[in-house]
Image (cartoon, helix red, strand yellow):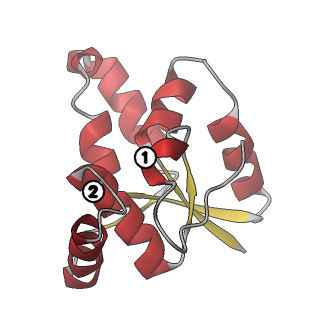
């Protein structure tokens, strides 16, 4: 079974009705073809939205995130992230934690921000 970490941009687009990437992945997960993950960075980035001050929208967002397995940032991911930043394979700390989690946990990455991750050796980007 494919294991995929879903980046924040894909989740935001889904909640705004802008694309079907996440919808397709959720359908594949129902069929047990994929297993979907987020990490603490994705969770934090998503929940900074001012829209989520509305209690109903917040409840729906929490419900949506129940479809993902959450990966915390442990020492292995932190060391991998530091390596990616040191080697300049990644430019931003948040993206580093996302790429680091994918590499350590052997996950593909579903993102529209492919240019943020294109220099990361060994990172498997999921096609739209």
Name the side, left or right, on which 42 lies relative to 79. right
Residue for badge 2: 40
| Spatial separation of the CA atoms under disc 1 and disc 2 | 18 Å
Q: Position of residue 126 (x, y in %)?
A: 66, 54
Q: Give the camera-side residue of 67 and 73.
A: 73
Is disc 1 placed on a helix, strand or loop? helix
Q: Above or below — where is 30 with respect to 78?
A: above
Q: Above or below — where is 46 with respect to 25?
A: above
Q: Give the camera-side residue of 48 and 95.
A: 95
Question: Which residue lies at the image location 42% right of the left edge and 29% below the top edge?
Answer: 60
| Identity of the residue furthest to the front in this view | 87
Query: Which labelled disc corresponds to residue 34?
Result: none
Question: Which residue lies at the image location 31% right of the left edge and 27% below the top edge?
Answer: 58
Q: Quadrant of residue 46?
A: top left
Assign the N terminus to one quadrant of the image. Answer: bottom right
Mark 2, Cα crowd under 10 Å, few <14 / some 14-19 / many 20+, is some
Q: Position of residue 74 (x, y in %)?
A: 22, 78
Q: Position of residue 13 (x, y in %)?
A: 53, 25
Residue for badge 1: 116
Q: Earlier in the sequence, mark 1 or mark 2?
A: 2
Is disc 2 placed on a helix, strand or loop? helix
Q: Quadrant of residue 54?
A: top left
């Amino acid at each position: 079974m494919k294991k995929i970490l879903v980046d924040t941009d894909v989740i935001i687009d889904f909640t705004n009705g802008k694309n079907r990437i996440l919808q397709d992945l959720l359908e594949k997960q129902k069929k047990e073809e994929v297993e979907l993950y987020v990490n603490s960075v994705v969770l934090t980035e998503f929940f900074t939205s001012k829209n989520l001050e509305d209690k109903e929208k917040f409840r729906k967002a929490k419900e949506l995130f129940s479809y993902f397995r959450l990966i915390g940032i442990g020492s292995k991911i932190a060391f991998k992230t530091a390596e990616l930043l040191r080697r300049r394979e990644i430019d931003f700390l948040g993206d580093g934690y996302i790429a680091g989690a994918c590499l350590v946990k052997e996950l593909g990455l579903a993102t529209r921000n492919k240019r943020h991750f294109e220099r990361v050796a060994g990172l498997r980007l999921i096609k739209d």
